[in-house]
Amino acid sequence: MTTRNRILAGIGLAALIAFPAAGATITSDQIEAGYDFREMVAVSDGKTFKVQVVAGPHGGVAPDAAATSLVSSLQGIGLPGARTTFVAGEAGRKGTGPDYRLVLAVSPARSVSAHALCASPPRVTHAAQPAGRLTLGAAWCRDDQVLSQAVVAIAASSIADPAVERGLSELLPVLFPTRPPGQDGGRPVFR
């Protein structure tokens, strides 16, 4: 291999590393002190899993259509360690137990916090997205308490784009880690 070809191969490899082919990037994540993976499994395994979708003005999709599309994508992925059925729903207790739910905000403004997502009802302002990009803010909530949170930016033309399901498949293990950061032999789980 000539020196020129080696240089071009190195540039190509660097481009692949810098711009992953998956088309989704977790831009932030936080696991709160109250998070426990076993709690998530206990409240979801063999049960329905409430997903509250707060849709913004992305791609002209109505909020109900966004909820249907996202819940369908989540159903195709599933949760780590739990067999569950995702259902679209609003915040609110059923019975006497806590209101557990996954809140997904489509195209949230950068100022929207996970605490605003877990509020009942969620307090979300939306921001315009560049063409070909969709941002999802996510929070796993127990009543109004944030248990975990993450934001994913996806290269997608609409909420129905297959890239959204791939982005959600990257989001769920970050949102529901089997062990919180720092409990993996002293090494952080997120690298």
Image (cartoon, rainbow, N blue to C red):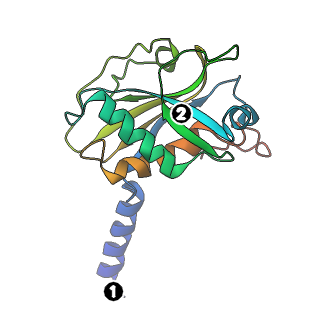
The residue sitting at 76% across, 45% down in the picture is: 184
Residue 77 appears left or right of 56: right
Quarter placement of the N terminus: bottom left
**Pointer 1 residue:** 2
Q: Which mark is residue 29?
A: 2
SS of the residue under disc 2: strand
How far across and how far down the image is residue 36, in percent? 73, 31
Residue 75 appears left or right of 191: left
Spatial CA span between label 1 and label 2: 43 Å
Callout 1 crowding tier (Cα within 10 Å): few <14, some 14–19, many ≥20: few
The residue sitting at 71% across, 36% down in the picture is: 37
Seen from the viewer's position, the closer of residues 14 and 62 is 62
**Which image quarter: residue 104?**
top left
User: Residue type at mark 1?
Assistant: Thr
**Which image quarter: residue 153?**
top left
Seen from the viewer's position, the closer of residues 60 and 130 is 60
Seen from the viewer's position, the closer of residues 160 and 86 is 86
Q: Are marks 1 and 2 in contact (CB under 8 Å)?
A: no
